[in-house]
């Protein structure tokens, strides 16, 4: 059996497990495992990889994360706070592992195989069940005290918006006002059921454009890639660009030309595969690091 790289995109609703012979979008096989309890989900994921000759394993996981300990932090996902993700795979498989956020994983995927090639800094923003942001500088994910959590940026409420917000921590932060659950809570229907001319989309663009401006001002990225289920709505990207341009008000001269802003804020090229492709990049890095430092402790 030839050696392969293992990848997991660990999400709040499903774990996508895959193997590939090399980094990139060409997968040998893939399996989707529903996210239930930590014990059940991690055991099923381990079984997917057991018996395969793994060079390394990359895990791009929902968060927030304790990257040093390989655990999940203060997530609203029931039962997963403190989930010891890395330990479960290290003890069962004994292979080199690299662990990062799902959005940092997606950012790596888009940077190396998608819409972010040759763009530095690069930001990936997913808008779905939550709102997450992966930031790459010099091709590497930004870590510090923790990983970026721009989904919890505070936004300026539109004057006619009385919605309380859906974030269990901050109520009306970006995620609380513009995530998929926020759309459903505010309008009584999921975004996928709302028509193109529904007022939800102008309001969504109002909040997401504030985040675009904040990220442009703070990180000065060469490109922002937008993904996630909410971004599948046709027309939303154009509304976000339009609102961002209005909010920037000509301050960033480079983006004053509408065509330049269209190149600055773009859709994900890898679609739903950005996270798993990024996890394969993490697996490759884990294997490379192990070849230099020796195998990890079991």
Image (tube, rainbow, N blue to C red):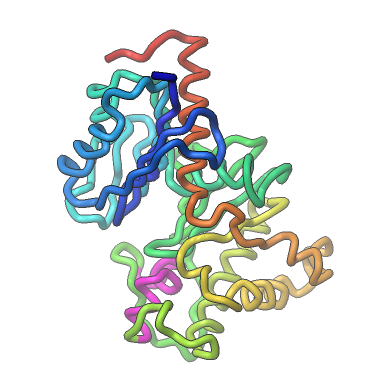
The quadrant of the image that shows the N terminus is top left
Q: Where is residue 48 in the image (x, y as percent from the top left)?
A: 28, 35
Instruction: Name the side, left or right, on which 50 lies relative to 68.
Output: left
Q: Is 166 above or below relative to 91?
A: below
Q: Where is residue 145 in the image (x, y as percent from the top left)?
A: 45, 38
Q: Which residue is drawn at 46% across and 52% down?
A: 149
Front one among 208 and 59: 59
Instruction: Name the side, left or right, on which 150 lies relative to 68.
Output: right
Q: Is 198 above or below relative to 20?
A: below
Q: Position of residue 220 (x, y in %)?
A: 70, 52
Task: Assess whether residue 182 is covered by the magenta stretch.
Answer: yes
Question: Is residue 64 visible in the rendered structure shown here?
Answer: no
Q: Where is residue 102 in the image (x, y as percent from the top left)?
A: 43, 46
The quadrant of the image that shows the C terminus is top left
Q: Main secondary structure of the magenta part?
A: helix
Instruction: Name the side, left or right, on which 171 lies relative to 204.
Output: left
Q: Residue at x 51, y 41 (%)?
A: 278
Question: Is residue 143 visible in the rendered structure shown here?
Answer: yes
Instruction: Name the side, left or right, on which 105 lies relative to 247.
Output: left
Q: Which residue is drawn at 47% across and 32% down?
A: 20
Numbered marks: total: 0
Q: What stretch is highlighted in magenta?
A: 171-187
């Amino acid at each position: 059996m030839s050696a392969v790289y293992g990848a997991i995109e660990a999400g709040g609703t499903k774990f996508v497990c895959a193997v590939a012979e090399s980094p990139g979008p060409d997968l040998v096989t893939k399996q989707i495992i529903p996210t239930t309890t930590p014990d059940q989900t991690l055991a099923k994921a381990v079984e997917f990889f057991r018996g395969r000759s793994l060079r390394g394993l990359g895990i791009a996981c929902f968060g927030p994360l304790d990257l040093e300990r390989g655990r999940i932090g203060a997530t609203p996902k029931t039962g997963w706070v403190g989930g010891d993700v890395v330990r479960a795979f290290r003890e069962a498989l004994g292979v080199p592992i690299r662990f990062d956020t799902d959005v940092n994983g997606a950012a790596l995927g888009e940077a190396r195989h998608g819409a972010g090639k040759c763009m530095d800094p690069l930001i990936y923003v997913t808008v779905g069940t939550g709102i997450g942001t992966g930031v790459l500088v010099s091709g590497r994910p930004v870590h510090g005290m923790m990983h970026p959590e721009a989904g919890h940026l505070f936004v300026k409420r539109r004057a006619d918006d009385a919605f309380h917000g859906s974030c269990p921590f901050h109520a009306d932060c970006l995620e609380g006002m513009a995530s998929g659950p926020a759309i459903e809570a505010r309008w009584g229907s999921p975004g996928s059921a709302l028509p193109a001319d529904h007022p939800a989309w102008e309001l969504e663009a109002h909040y997401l454009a504030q985040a675009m401006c904040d990220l442009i001002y703070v990180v000065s990225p060469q490109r922002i890639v937008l993904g996630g289920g909410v971004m599948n709505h046709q027309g939303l990207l154009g509304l976000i660009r339009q609102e961002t341009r209005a909010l920037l008000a000509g301050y960033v001269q480079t983006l004053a030309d509408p065509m330049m802003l269209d190149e600055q804020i773009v859709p994900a090229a890898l679609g739903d595969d950005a996270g798993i492709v990024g996890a394969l990049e993490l697996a490759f890095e884990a294997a490379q690091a192990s070849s230099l430092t020796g195998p990890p402790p079991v």
